[in-house]
Amino acid sequence: MPNCYLCDKEITKSNQSKEHLIPNAIGGKLASCNIWCSSCIDYYGTIDTQITEPLKPIASLLDIFRDRGRNQSFSATGLDDTKLIVEPRGSAYIRHADVKEKNHGDKTELNISVGGRTHNERLKNLEKVLKGKQRKYPQITDELISQFLDKAKSVKAFPENDLMKCPTIVFGGTGGFQALTKIALHIYIFHRGKPFNSDDIVKYIKTEESEYERAWFSFDYSPFIESEIVSNSYVLIGDQKNRILWCYIDLLSVYPVVIILNDDYQGPNFANSYEHNVIDNTESEPTIVNIIDRKNLLGMIEKKDRPYNIAQARINRVIEYYYRSNNMPLEKSKFT
């Protein structure tokens, strides 16, 4: 049996734990029970939240396929600063009741907006607001409220471009690159078994206190031909000639990074590719059409470019997929 690379304890049937190479929270499908023990996964598994939380709006909006659990709702803000709750597949409701009063002489007009996941939930929230107004407006009797609720209708709304601001995606940060480095190392262990001399990487994953920082964005480089699907994908390359071991990871087609796992690699040449369509749950080994060399890989990380315009274009492409899947007009799908 293999050993846990974090604590070196042998992994047995009693202490093994299923680990998704790419977190299940963002649709990861590939999994292994031979990467780390149950004690370590309980202790260190939370670092994935550094990348899953920023990507949760995209995962929920598309209602991606997950092995376990459902996609969660997320908070959003309308262009008029209304606070919204957005459900999987994009249906939305306001988070807090909004009451506007307008006086017309001796009469007062009440405009009430309430939210809720279901019609009954929205009716309950409306009833609560109306009862709260009875002290100020005693003419709002229980009988009148009951009659009004019996006739009330409600509908769900989709947050089109003029109703919702683009979800904020936080790229990078120390915790984010730490989690991505962990994913890259797990991909290597999954394909190649016992890891190379990875003391610096293990220390970085455990504590963040390490000189090891060899991960950076790859917005302007991809080893694949660009496709229309929304996917989690990666390429793992061992390049003996260039003495470099590296991994390209693209999460939900909006978060691409390159991680250098070893810049003095002396092992065999190999290349592993993987793509998981998170919408229809299909897997494939995409053809690698563009392998970047050592000089450009290291230069990408050292240069620290931030091509946010490309990042925004990637997000827009995924948002457009959401619009198409809900038969919405594409001219409304551009976010800025």
Image: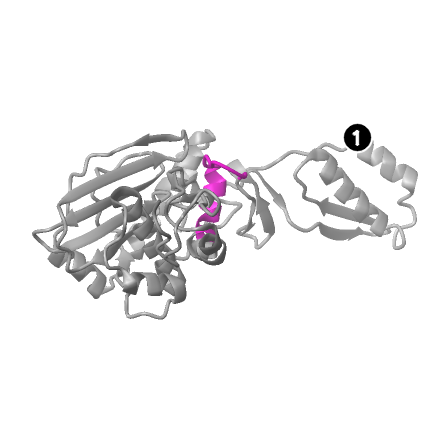
Residue 108 lies, in percent from the top left, at: 82, 50
Instruction: For residue 168, say whether it is visible.
Output: no
Residue 291 lies, in percent from the top left, at: 15, 46
Looking at the rendering, the stretch of residues picked out in magenta corresponds to 52-70
Magenta segment includes 62: yes
Quadrant of residue 265 within the rendered picture: bottom left
Q: Is residue 263 above or below residue 14?
A: below
Q: Is residue 192 above or below residue 210?
A: above
300 relative to 323 in the view: left or right? left
Render colour scheme: one colour
Residue name at image x 12 percent, y 52 percent: 293
Residue 246 lies, in percent from the top left, at: 21, 52
Q: Nearer the viewer, residue 40 or 238?
A: 40
**Residue highlighted by disc 1:** 151
Instruction: For residue 8, say whether it is visible.
Output: yes
49 relative to 143 in the view: left or right? left
316 relative to 221 in the view: left or right? right
In the rendered view of the protein, which quadrant contains the N terminus?
top left
Residue name at image x 24 percent, y 56 percent: 261
